[in-house]
Image (cartoon, helix red, strand yellow):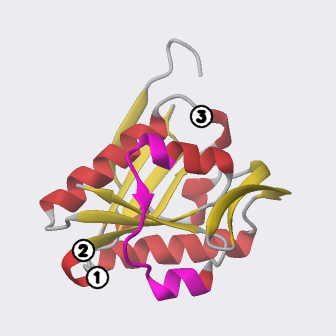
Amino acid sequence: MTGTDRIAYRNLRKEEITRELFRQFIRRQEVGKCWRRVNGEWVIKDDPFVDDWSEADYEELVACLKNTLAAGGFVYAAFCDDALKGFVSVEAAPFGGEQGYLDLSSIHVSCDMRGRGVGRALFAAAKEWARAHGGRKLYISAHSAVESQAFYKAMGCVEAQVYHPGHVEAEPYDCQLECAL
């Protein structure tokens, strides 16, 4: 990003969420260490791998984001030079009883734009939307990479008081977090 690049943020419309939208989006994340629960304690473990999305993953993402909008949820994005460089989604259906959770179902920043405040802006927009739609807390089933967890901690997230069983089953290594609104 140069000094002349500008980041524009806006809601996405269902009809623009296609595979083509993600052509310049770089999901790649090189992971070295992750948080793991061992004997009831959170510890950092070596777990090197590269996280990236396949074409099938992108197809599933497109379907999920369209479904989020169809169900009344929120999909918000960051663009740089008209290319998608980050996005966040929040589901509309509350869960967790008195916790009043709304599910932050995705937040991703393109590899070439990380560390520039895009994730922070997307997270703030998700919180604002969730608050305006009756949520008490955001629920996040979050990647356990040390860098990802540092981001969530900086956003004010803590371990969830109530775990969503579906998220735990789908991603057993994720950290289940919440963020008060």
Dots 2, 1 in contact, CB < 8 A: yes
Dots 3, 1 in contact, CB < 8 A: no
Q: CA distance from mark 2 to mark 1?
A: 8 Å
Q: CA distance from mark 3 to mark 1?
A: 32 Å
Q: Which residue is mark 2?
A: 99
Q: Mark 2: give few (<14), some (14-19) or many (20+) Cα within 10 Å.
A: some
In which quadrant of the rendered view does residue 150 lie?
top right
The quadrant of the picture occupied by the N terminus is top right
Q: CA distance from mark 2 to mark 3?
A: 33 Å
Image coordinates of residue 8 in percent, x first then y, are 38, 34
Magenta residues (range): 152-169
Q: Which residue is mark 1?
A: 95
Q: Say left or right for 2 vs 71.
A: right
**Is residue 90 in view from this perspective?**
yes
Q: Earlier in the sequence, mark 3 or mark 1?
A: 1
Q: Earlier in the sequence, mark 2 or mark 3?
A: 2
Closer to us: 116 or 46: 46
Q: Residue furthest top?
A: 3
Q: Nearer the viewer, mark 2 or mark 1?
A: 2
Image coordinates of residue 24 in percent, x first then y, are 64, 46
Q: Nearer the viewer, mark 2 or mark 3?
A: 2
Q: Mark 1: give few (<14), some (14-19) or many (20+) Cα within 10 Å.
A: some
The quadrant of the picture occupied by the C terminus is bottom left
* Residue 44 against residue 116 in the figure, above or below: below
The residue at the point 28 percent across, 82 percent down is 95
What kind of residue is marked 1?
Answer: Phe
Closer to us: 59 or 179: 179
SS at mark 1 in the image: loop
SS at mark 2 in the image: helix
What kind of residue is marked 3?
Answer: Met
